[in-house]
Amino acid sequence: MPKTIAVIGAGLGGLTTANLLVDRGHKVVLFESFARPGGYTAGFRRMGYYFESGTLSFESRGVFEKMMADLGLTGRLPLVPMKMRMVSPYFDVVVDSLPVLKAALYEAFPGDRAGLDGYFREIDPLIEAMRPLVKEAIPTQFEGFAQLKAMLPFVLAGPRFMLRRRRVKGLTIDELAAKHFAPGTPVYRFFTGLGYPKMEVLTQAGMFLVVTEDYWHAQDGMQTWADLLADRFRDRGGDLRLNAPVERILTKDGAAVGVVSKGETFLADAVVSGCDYKKTFLKLLDDPSIVPAATLEKIRDAALSEGIFTIYLGLKMRGEELLSKMKATSVGYMPLDRDVDPEDAKAADHFDKDGFSLYSPSLINPQLAPEGRSSLMIQVVAPAHWQDDWHRSDPAAYRALKERVRDRLVARAEAVVPGLGTAVEFVDAATPLTYERYTGNTDGATSGWSWNPKKPFYKGGAIATKVATPVRNLWIGSCWAGQIGGIPNAIGAAYLAAKKIGR
């Protein structure tokens, strides 16, 4: 029986959910508060330069290819493998494989050979146990017999994976590093600085695997992906409403029955939230009392993934010159000389000491910059409420702080790209407040909930996906359905939400 469905948010999760639901014969209206679809997987152009809004790359090509095939979009979004160079005062290596990275670390830290042996002795079995799984489409993306067949690799590899996972379950990368290296040393800072702060060891193991074997850029930019999904949704009869923020989720007798957008009531048989989980329940729900008070408190207090500060640069520098300096399309710079606490909002020197990453969209595709020019993005983890909440209440002080951080990071990036400052002809920057404004994510959270296993929102850890909510007929169709966010989990949640709503 066809249903009327309201989907909130045209990020990747919302776009995928909406497409899957319209294919099931439902009437679907997709509400997006911004002028274009995409959320964190969007992009924009300035002065002829294209930049990614936030997300630069993603893992799990198998999940991507299955989704694109199901939507009839195979081959419409060419991918380019990510090539990462890692730089510090101790090493400089293009990470073509995990053995190459290991060799660089052993050469850089000869006095820590025993610690490196011990660290990799614990993490290598996890990597090998995950290897048969990470490149596969996930069973959630299939139905019927095909789902049983898709589960086979997971069934075969599952016991070994669960056995090895049990040894480090709930262990953070800081705790594992402290077992093998002295805290405060460069090698300790290296391992604790990889990925999200204090994330689970299991997640770091997966990161080692995907970064070296299964990490991808969209050749034409992430916005192309969002536009493909949006156009496809419209072509299938879906109703995409841009510049249409949802103001309330309507409920009756404990169930979601519609939404209000721009003062207009839209009644629905089900509502799918592809937006911020906290705002869904703490700001949009018309009657929060239908949710137990303890659950609302848990949502309010739940820890989020970190935000980022991003700088967008248009350069008077040919691509060949930029590549000769970067030596790869992506660079991770790690000074390793001081401890960094990304939760310390009072650390005035945070952006003087934290590592940063560089990425050039135009080195992936020269058409993403004017002829003879190149583009560059600088990103660094940013405390959400840094320096009195980024001076949120004082626009002039906010702009001055933003510009000071921007200029400092551009100057620091000269360590990788000499002459960078004099080549800049366009510059802009985004703080966690910028991301909160454009994506709706509380504190500009980049990936939903916290990656720290000590601060879980969901039980079940990194592998759980839960699209049901305390409100009947209100579903989660985005990365917020799992403790660990990211594009593959957003896609998995979209498939599961569409299945739960049914035909």
Image (cartoon, rainbow, N blue to C red):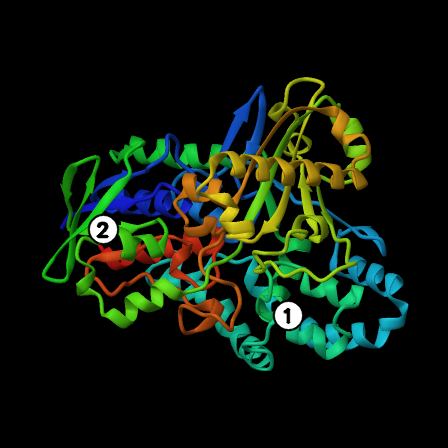
Can you give x and y, in whole percent of width and height, for residue 498 in the image?
A: 29, 53
Viewer-nearest residue: 320 or 402: 402
Distance from disc 2 to disc 1, alpha carbons, whole Å, reads: 37 Å
**From this viewpoint, is residue 498 visible?**
no
Can you give x and y, in whole percent of width and height, for residue 245 in the image?
A: 29, 38
Q: Residues within 10 Å of mark 1 (few under 14, many from 20)?
A: many
Q: Amino acid at mark 2?
A: Val
Which of the 4 image quarters holds residue 39?
top left
Q: Is residue 269 above or below residue 411?
A: below
Where disc 1 sits, the SS reads helix
Q: Is residue 252 above or below residue 172?
A: above
Q: Is residue 4 above or below residue 321?
A: below
Picture mark count = 2
Residue 271: give its label: 2
At horizontal 64% and vertical 51% (from top left) the residue drawn is 348
Image check: 261 left or right of 487? left
At horizontal 51% and vertical 50% (from top left) the residue drawn is 388
Can you give x and y, in whole percent of width and height, for residue 182 in the image?
A: 78, 74
Viewer-nearest residue: 25 or 191: 191
Image check: 152 left or right of 417? left
Residue 98: give its label: none
The residue beneath circle 1 is 173
Q: Residues within 10 Å of mark 2 (few under 14, many from 20)?
A: many
Can you give x and y, in whole percent of width and height, for residue 410 in the image?
A: 71, 36
**From this viewpoint, is residue 165 visible?**
yes
Where disc 2 sits, the SS reads strand
**Chain-order first, disc 2 or disc 1:** 1
Q: Amino acid at mark 1?
A: Ile
Image check: 339 left or right of 389? right
**Residue furthest out toward the top:** 371
Image check: 47 left or right of 425? left
Circles 2, 1 touching at the beta carbon (< 8 Å): no
